[in-house]
């Protein structure tokens, strides 16, 4: 057999092999919370490199993500606001925490560095109620006696979309401020007394970055990625705490996942001298009886991989990986709750 014949045979063989390889590649579809988007993106890139399978994740907010999974337009939904056991049962959904992180108050005040400004829950609530209107208000100055703050109006930035970040932020405010609890309450969307709306953690981060003397609330990874200035907070124990992986872990340590139906946990305003006060988990939602069992199985493979190999990547973005004991509970729940082929 001459060389040209061998070459043609090799080309034919390659063409018959390549389609079968590409046909095995699967894109997993999900939508929801913007809170975990940085870590989901990092996991997706690494998973694609290792397996050839991609993750098509729409960072559209928790409220929209819940609607997408209810409409069965995606394989999984993602929400920072966990659904109750009754809600899960009504829709035939399984729920579990994927990773934990934290929410920070970000500000744009000229000359100010991260952690120099100290706020507490009541002051934060009063800013978002519109009761505190200027940065040199007496209540802010009391917490920051040595800080020179401008006599400038505070531009309040908040979410405009249904948001799990908002759920956790407003849950915290409702726990520390009776006025906030009675006048506004908590939820993925609330009737904001004041403020400029922005879509997603991305939108709030971008708005604060562009607006002098503004304040907003975002997931910590967004604050770091956008080089935003964030405030220290006074926690439930009365201690001034900086946002760090250690303070996030201290708050998360109190969670009793084993006895939480549907893994329902709210981690705001946790006790402990070292606890960051606005810590939160982000959750995955999938059907117990999936429309597409193959797609559901592929998604579970990705989540299993993320638990096993994504911990270090999560920590690099200042998220808190789920403890191994909790991951075992989660995987056991998959075997029990989610039907597969």
Image (cartoon, rainbow, N blue to C red):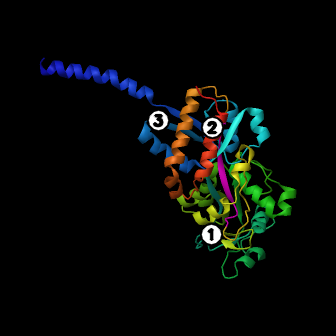
Please state the horizontal and vertical placement of residue 337, each as a whole percent of the image: 67, 34
Q: What residue is rendered at 69% in x and 71% in y? A: 273
Q: What residue is rendered at 67% in x and 65% in y? A: 276
Mostly what secondary structure, the magenta segment? strand
Q: What crowding class fits label 1: few (fewer than 14 Cα within 10 Å), some (14-19), or many (20 or more)?
A: many
Q: Quadrant where the C terminus lies? A: top right
- Residue at the outermost left position: 2
Residue 97 appears anywhere in the view: yes
Q: Secondary structure at mark 2?
A: helix
Please state the horizontal and vertical placement of residue 262, each as a whole percent of the image: 72, 43
Magenta range is: 275-286
Q: What crowding class fits label 3: few (fewer than 14 Cα within 10 Å), some (14-19), or many (20 or more)?
A: many
For label 1, the residue is 242
Q: What crowding class fits label 2: few (fewer than 14 Cα within 10 Å), some (14-19), or many (20 or more)?
A: some
Please state the horizontal and vertical placement of residue 42, each as a whole percent of the image: 49, 48
Classify 334 as above or below 164. above
Q: What residue is rendered at 77% in x and 56% in y? A: 171
């Amino acid at each position: 057999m001459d060389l040209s014949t061998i070459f043609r045979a090799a080309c034919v063989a390659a063409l018959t092999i390549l389609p079968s390889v590409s046909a095995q590649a699967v894109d997993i579809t999900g939508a929801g919370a913007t809170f975990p988007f940085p870590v989901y993106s990092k996991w997706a890139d690494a998973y694609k490199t290792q397996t050839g399978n991609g993750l098509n994740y729409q960072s559209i907010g928790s409220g929209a993500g819940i609607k997408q999974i209810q409409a069965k337009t995606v394989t999984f939904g993602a929400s920072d606001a966990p659904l109750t056991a009754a809600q899960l049962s009504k829709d035939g959904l399984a729920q579990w925490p994927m990773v934990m992180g934290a929410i920070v108050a970000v500000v744009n005040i000229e000359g100010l560095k991260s952690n120099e400004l100290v706020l507490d829950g009541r002051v934060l609530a009063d800013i978002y109620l519109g009761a505190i209107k200027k940065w040199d208000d007496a209540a802010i100055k009391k917490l920051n006696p040595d800080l020179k703050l401008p006599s400038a109006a505070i531009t309040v930035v908040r979410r405009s979309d249904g948001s799990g970040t908002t759920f956790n932020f407003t849950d915290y405010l409702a726990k520390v401020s009776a006025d906030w609890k009675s006048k506004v309450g908590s939820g993925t969307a609330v009737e904001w007394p004041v403020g400029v709306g922005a879509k997603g953690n991305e939108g709030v981060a971008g708005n604060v970055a562009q607006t002098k003397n503004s304040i907003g609330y975002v997931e910590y990874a967004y604050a770091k990625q956008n080089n935003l200035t964030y405030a220290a907070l006074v926690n439930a124990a009365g201690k001034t705490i900086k946002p760090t992986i250690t303070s996030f872990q201290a708050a998360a340590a109190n969670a009793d996942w084993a006895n939480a139906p549907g893994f329902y946990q709210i981690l705001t305003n946790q006790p402990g001298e070292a606890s960051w006060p606005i810590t939160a988990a982000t959750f995955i939602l999938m059907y117990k009886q999936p429309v597409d069992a193959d797609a559901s199985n592929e998604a579970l493979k990705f989540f299993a991989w993320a638990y096993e190999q994504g911990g270090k990547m999560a920590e690099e973005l200042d998220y808190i990986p789920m403890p191994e004991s909790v991951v075992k509970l989660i995987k056991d729940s998959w075997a029990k709750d989610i039907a597969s082929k």
